Image (cartoon, grey):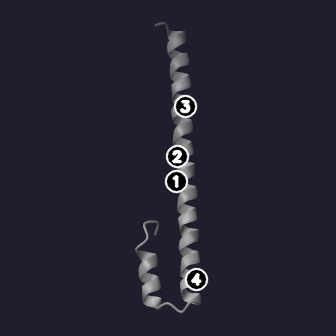
Amino acid sequence: MDIDALQTFLGTTVTAVILKILAALAFWLVGRWLIGRVIALVQAAMSRNHVDPTLTKYLARSSPSR
């Protein structure tokens, strides 16, 4: 295998890996943001329906995103 072929192979492979890492990071950030929004909406609904504030705080703290 010559140097040019190796450079081409590494260039395409590294580019693909970097794009996959960036996509995974973007999905993680968007997912984390969405989970936070859903938790906020559920907390608002629980307080509107006069659910015990202790239970509301407990459920919010037991979520994996916080």
| 32 left or right, relative to 64 | right
Q: Is residue 15 above or below residue 29?
A: above
Q: Which mark is residue 28?
A: 1
Q: Of the residues under marks 2 and 3, which one precedes in the sequence?
A: 3
Q: Residues within 10 Å of mark 4 (few under 14, many from 20)?
A: few
Q: Residues within 10 Å of mark 3 (few under 14, many from 20)?
A: few
Q: Residues within 10 Å of mark 1 (few under 14, many from 20)?
A: few
Q: Which mark is residue 45?
A: 4
* Residue occupying the point 43% across, 89% down: 54
Q: Residues within 10 Å of mark 2 (few under 14, many from 20)?
A: few
Q: Which mark is residue 24?
A: 2
Q: Secondary structure at mark 4?
A: helix
* Tag nearer the camera, 4 or 2: 4
| 16 left or right, relative to 57 | right
Residue at numbered disc 3 = 16
Instruction: Find the distance from the CA under tag 3 to the CA under tag 1.
Output: 18 Å
Horizontal and vertical percent for residue 5? 53, 11
* Residue occupying the point 43% across, 78% down: 59
Q: Is residue 62 above or below residue 57?
A: above
Please state which amino acid type lies under the numbered disc 3.
Ala
* Tag nearer the camera, 4 or 1: 4
Please state which amino acid type lies under the numbered disc 2.
Ala
